[in-house]
Amino acid sequence: MTDATSEGNFYVAGRAGERSPAPPRSGASAVRLTPERLPAGLRLLGPVLVVLAWEAASRLGLLSPATLTAPSTALATGYQMFSDGSLLPHLLASAGRAYSGLFLGVLAGVVLALLSGLTRTGEALIDGLVQIKRAVPTLALIPLVIIWLGIGEAMKVFLIFTAVLVPVYINTHAALRGIDIGHIELARTLGLSRGEFIRHVALPGALPGFFVSLRLAVALCWTALVVLELINTQTGIGYLMNRARDWGQTDIIVVGIIIYAVLGLVSDAVVRAVEAKVLSYRRSLGS
Amino acid sequence: MTFHRPITPEVVLRDLSRSFKGKTVLDRVSLEIPRGQFVALLGESGSGKTTLLRALAGLDDDAETAGHFQVAGSTSVLFQDSRLLPWMSVIGNVTLGLRRPDARAAALEMLGAVGLGDKTDVWPSTLSGGQKQRASLARSLLRAPDVLLADEPFGALDALTRLRMQALLLRLVERQRPTVILVTHDVEEALLLADRILVLKDGRIAEDHPVRMPQPRRVDHPEFAGLRQTLLSSLGVETEAV
Ligand SMILES: Nc1ncnc2c1ncn2[C@@H]1O[C@H](COP(=O)(O)OP(=O)(O)OP(=O)(O)O)[C@@H](O)[C@H]1O
Ligand SMILES: [Mg+2]
């Protein structure tokens, strides 16, 4: 792992070329295999253009507010809902559901992955079950879970929990299983105890896989919420949007969509920031 | 050495055979290595050098093995790829699994000795190939092993770095006096470092040469050139062409 990355990928990696001011050989410029790294703000170019076109279409009367509200109207509505306090309870209700399901799902996924990845008994007992759960779409469980848990909060959190658990388990388990054989041999020749091996080799080695799963999980918990908030609730962003549909208020629907997008992006950014900090040893690998 | 050393062999192999899926790699190898001897193990690619070393290190114990071997004392392995854990600082790697109260102080001393005194707290990925191998060497020697098992530890390094590493290894080995088994492709490396050179061929020890040149050795020593010729031709290299 260490050696291949330090030398093998050197010229392919985008940034390495920029840092070392090596003159191009024999006049011809070197072939770039990967596109140059995008300056931070430029990623927003596409979204900004779409929003501008949308706004223009609304103002020119090409887009009726009954079909789709103008982004400026949606922003104004959103701001107003925020300042008169009508938005916050719904936001908190949604976030509460999403994050309690996420928390429980990640916790259970990691615990199960550890049991199954580090012990044979655990693998025999757990892995088959999770694989079966993986084959069943979360939404297919809704009727059964409603019978068990009713149509209240418990049902919603439970379904988010099960949706999140599976990818967390799968990725973390795979990472634990795919541990570098060279590192296992090293641990043996250094005479590490099982506890030391798990703490210093197996767990840190599985962390990148865990973070992949965490990013999936964060996206999933909000996705599941949209559907679940259509069922018997008086709170939540999904409820707001659903009610707005009955009244034909496309501005509120757009506000809801924007909130989901922002929450999704912010959550992902938070996970990525934590990941970058925890896995900071990788930052120096040139890619 | 001024003090008396017992001459009981530290590493003993008796008719050690090892095969993978029916293919014999080691074929009744018998060998005795006295304590403190520096042995270089040469052989063509695929002749079983790594297999022999890994057997002594207690690895590959799922392979079919016959005969027996005994290593009296602790071993430490120096791998060709330095096998530093990327998520641990250099000093964390070097002290990993070390059970002694002064581990950190000893590690700092050892890292200083291998010339990494200013790299103790960096990530391994920021080290050059030679520096990684120094860290790996420090990790091995910090355990003060009775037997150091090294599998082409300098094979991936450039010629200059390799010379420096050879000198470093020699210096540290003289300090600690472990028994060393060094697998190498490099006849000159063997001649510069070892007290004894073994040539492995078809899974057996085909040749066993003592090397009596005093340290530090020079390539223009008369014994050097002669032994070099012998070894190269037993490895199947036409010496005229070299
Ligand atoms: N785990 C294994 N499973 C199957 N075959 C193996 C295994 N390890 C080694 N071999 C085989 O044993 C033979 C000797 O391999 P070994 O690695 O010991 O050679 P070597 O002398 O170290 O070669 P090199 O100089 O290229 O490193 C090879 O033919 C190899 O394919
Ligand atoms: Mg080998």
Image (spheres, coloured by chain):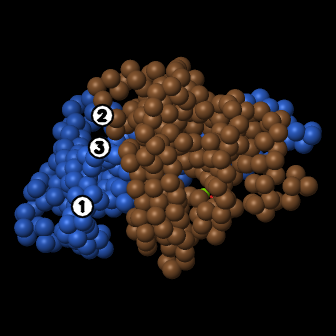
Q: Given the current orientation, which residue lies at the most extreme bottom position?
A: B22
> Residue A78, relative to residue A170: is it above or below?
above
Secondary structure of the residue carrying tag 3 is: helix
Amino acid beneath label 2: Arg
Find chain B in the image and tell me its colour.
Answer: brown
Q: Distance between the residues labelled 2 and 3?
A: 12 Å
Asked whether, in this view, residue A17 is left or right of residue A278, the answer is: right
Quarter of the rendered image showing ligand 1: bottom right
- Cα–Cα span, label 1 and label 3: 15 Å
Chain for disc number 2: B
Q: Are marks 2 and 3 in contact (CB under 8 Å)?
A: no
Provide the residue designation for mark 2.
B99
Is disc 1 surrounded by few (<14), some (14 to 19) or many (20+) residues within 10 Å? Answer: few
Q: Which mark is residue A196?
A: 3
Residue situated in front as seen by the camera: A44 or B76:
B76
Total marks shown come to: 3
- Is any part of residue A136 visible from this angle? no
Whether marks 2 and 3 lie on the same chain: no
Residue type of the residue flagged with mark 1: Thr
Q: In this view, does A278 lie to the left or right of A163?
A: right
Q: Which of marks 2 and 3 is in front?
A: 2
Q: Which of A15 and B30 is in front in this view?
A: B30
Mark 1 residue CB less than 8 A from any atom of ligand 1: no
Residue B199, percent from left and from top: 66, 58
Name the residue rendered at 20%, 66% in the picture.
A121
Write the residue at 61% across / 62% down: B205
Res A144 quadrant in image? bottom left
